[in-house]
């Protein structure tokens, strides 16, 4: 019986792969520009397979560390970020990187903190929720909906929120000379972006150390060695001494005398190698992320474009382009912006004028989700995770309980707010930025770790409260 | 539906986390393992795949032994003996 069910699930996995292959082939046959969207699609598919295979979730990395003392996911993420950095440094040094650093400021820490609390409450980060949706998890789908709706609303809300905008932000935003249609003096996020964030410096570890960013020395010594490898190593050593060393100490309890440097080194190596599954996922993910930058930039050169907005115009779909003719087209892995876009598109169709803000109207647009490259990536990510889950007989439809729904909506809303304040989520604002030598990535990461710590404290209090009654009955 | 914790027999407890996502299964498992006595068994039933790795790693790090792992149709059952 079990074998029959497993077989059926494997057939479903093949059907999904076939469906996506059919989309790629048929759209390419219809118009060659669709290959640009298919490139996003297949990288998303790979990300989904990797995330599900390695249970790769940034929320679990720091939450499991603080809550249950398990460092395996922090290790996986650090392996992945270093590999991604090595590949993307090559892309940077050859001058075809699609990455742009983000303004550096305390806002990244605050945004990361809000996001970190949210991801613990929700039970998964932005990318983790996508892959868990692919496992049939209804709670994760609810998290995605909550992130999407919160972002799409947050970027366009003015009214009483305008009263919370400092006068200096308002004046600075007006002085930017943005098109009248954007109405930059109205809307909290607009004034936060144009009046505060855009005034912050943009840099990279390479530039901070005096290198020219687009050189091999700048990319590999400045960005990778100083900006990624050293901080990652320090983080892993701290994790080892606080959490990872415990099990090693127990194994060496029989040993007389002090634990030597060699013992510690061997324990550190064991911690790195302890979860083969996560390490493999991290490795493939890191390489795929770097390759995506290569492929997308290559396609841009082939088609002579700088942004997917031009592709959409050429295939006859100019609805929802920003005032500059652009749409969201990062050229690398990203999660939250496209989630805001599809809800933004829906809101627009329902009559909400949401193109008078910077996020949608000036930068990202709200293209038809069926033609949005980044949406193709996210949908394929869910499908890739579903395929991997089906192949391993781990796919199961699960409806959220009322309690989980509350956690999911609350956590998703906090992640949505954190994402827009930090200009990205655990992927766009942390993973991609860190790997590309952007100090703003580590700032978001520091906030995210702090937020996860507070989130776990709250969660511990909640579970103690939930358990107290049952434990009292059992007299434990 | 809520998380259920019951005494199955002398020294054997059951924690049913079916339907619950991260971090519920691993946090409840950790908390209950802290409460029960050494040598007692905790049977954890869950269907959230990623909790499987977390609970395994947690037991390895804390010295609690997973004496049995079963998986059928997306339902995972771990029998853990407290160290």
Image (cartoon, rainbow, N blue to C red):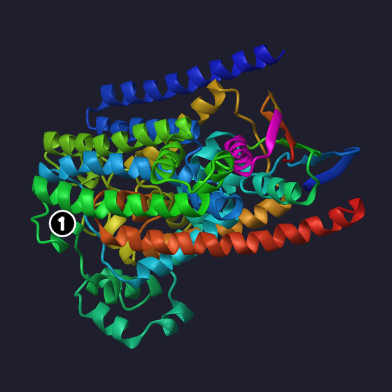
Rendered residue at 54%/45% (across/down): A249
In percent of width and height, residue A217 lies at: 10, 48
In percent of width and height, residue A166 lies at: 36, 85
Q: How many marks?
A: 1
Location of residue A205 by image quarter: bottom left
| Residue toward you, B40 or A418 | B40
Q: Quadrant of the N terminus of chain A?
A: top right
**Chain on which label 1 sits:** A
| Residue toward you, A144 or A256 | A256
- The majority secondary structure of the magenta stretch comes to helix
Graded by Cα atoms within 10 Å as few (under 14), some (14 to 19) or many (20 or more), the crowding at tag 1 reads many
Image: magenta residue range: B49-67
The residue to which callout 1 is attached is A206
From the viewer's perspective, is residue A454 above or below residue A145? below
Q: Is residue A89 left or right of residue A431?
A: left
Rendered residue at 32%/78% (across/down): A185
Location of residue A340 by image quarter: bottom left
Q: Residue furthest front?
A: A256
Residue B65 in magenta?
yes
| Residue toward you, A237 or A39 | A237
Residue A309 in magenta?
no
Q: Is residue A366 visible?
A: no
In percent of width and height, residue A199 lies at: 23, 74
In percent of width and height, residue A235 lies at: 39, 54
SS label for mark 1: helix
């Amino acid at each position: 019986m079990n074998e029959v069910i497993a077989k059926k699930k494997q057939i479903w996995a093949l059907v999904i792969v076939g469906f996506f292959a059919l989309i790629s082939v048929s759209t390419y046959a219809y118009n060659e520009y669709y290959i640009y969207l298919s490139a996003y699609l297949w990288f998303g598919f790979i990300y989904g397979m990797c995330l599900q295979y390695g249970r790769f979730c940034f929320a679990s990395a720091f939450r499991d560390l603080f809550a249950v003392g398990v460092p395996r996911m922090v290790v996986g993420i650090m392996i992945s970020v270093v590999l991604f950095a090595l590949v993307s440094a090559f892309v940077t040094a050859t001058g075809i990187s699609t990455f742009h650093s983000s303004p550096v400021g305390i806002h990244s820490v605050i945004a990361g903190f809000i996001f970190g609390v949210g991801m613990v409450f929700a039970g998964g980060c932005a990318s983790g929720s996508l892959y868990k949706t692919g496992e049939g998890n209804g709670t994760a789908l609810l998290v995605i909906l909550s992130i999407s709706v919160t972002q799409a609303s947050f970027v366009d809300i003015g009214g009483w929120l305008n009263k919370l905008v400092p006068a200096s932000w308002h004046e600075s935003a007006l002085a930017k000379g943005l098109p009248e249609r954007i109405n930059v003096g109205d809307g909290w996020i607009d004034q936060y972006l144009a009046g505060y964030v855009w005034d912050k410096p943009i840099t990279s570890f390479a530039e901070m150390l005096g290198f020219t960013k687009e050189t091999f020395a700048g990319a590999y010594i400045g960005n990778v060695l100083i900006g990624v490898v050293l901080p990652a190593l320090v983080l892993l050593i701290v994790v080892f001494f606080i959490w990872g060393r415990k099990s090693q100490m127990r194994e060496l309890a029989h040993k007389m005398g002090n634990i030597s440097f060699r013992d510690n080194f061997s324990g550190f190596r064991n911690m790195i190698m302890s979860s083969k599954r996560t390490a493999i996922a991290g490795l493939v993910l890191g390489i795929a992320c770097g390759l995506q930058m290569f492929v997308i930039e290559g396609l841009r050169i082939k088609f002579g474009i700088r942004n997917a907005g031009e592709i959409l115009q050429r295939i006859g779909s100019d609805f929802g382009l920003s005032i500059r003719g652009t749409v969201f087209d990062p050229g690398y892995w990203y999660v939250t912006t496209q989630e805001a876009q599809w809800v933004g598109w829906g809101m627009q169709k329902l009559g909400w004028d949401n193109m008078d803000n910077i996020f949608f109207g000036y930068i990202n647009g709200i293209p038809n989700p069926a033609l949005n490259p980044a949406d193709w990536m996210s949908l394929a990510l869910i499908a890739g995770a579903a395929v991997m889950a089906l192949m391993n007989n781990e796919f199961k439809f699960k409806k959220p309980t009322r309690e989980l729904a509350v956690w999911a909506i609350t956590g998703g809303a906090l992640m949505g707010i954190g994402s827009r304040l930090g200009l990205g989520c655990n992927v766009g604002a942390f993973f991609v930025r860190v790997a590309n030598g952007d100090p703003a990535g580590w700032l978001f990461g520091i906030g995210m770790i702090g937020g996860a710590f507070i989130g776990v404290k709250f969660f511990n209090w909640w579970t103690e409260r939930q358990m107290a009654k049952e434990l009292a009955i059992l007299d434990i | 539906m809520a998380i259920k914790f019951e005494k199955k027999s002398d020294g054997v407890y059951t924690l049913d986390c079916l339907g619950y996502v991260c971090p519920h299964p691993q946090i409840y498992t950790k908390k209950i393992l802290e409460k029960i006595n050494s040598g007692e068994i905790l049977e954890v039933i869950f269907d959230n795949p990623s909790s499987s790795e977390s609970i395994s790693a947690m037991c390895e790090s804390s010295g609690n032994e997973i004496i049995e792992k079963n998986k059928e149709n997306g339902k995972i059952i771990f029998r853990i003996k407290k160290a």
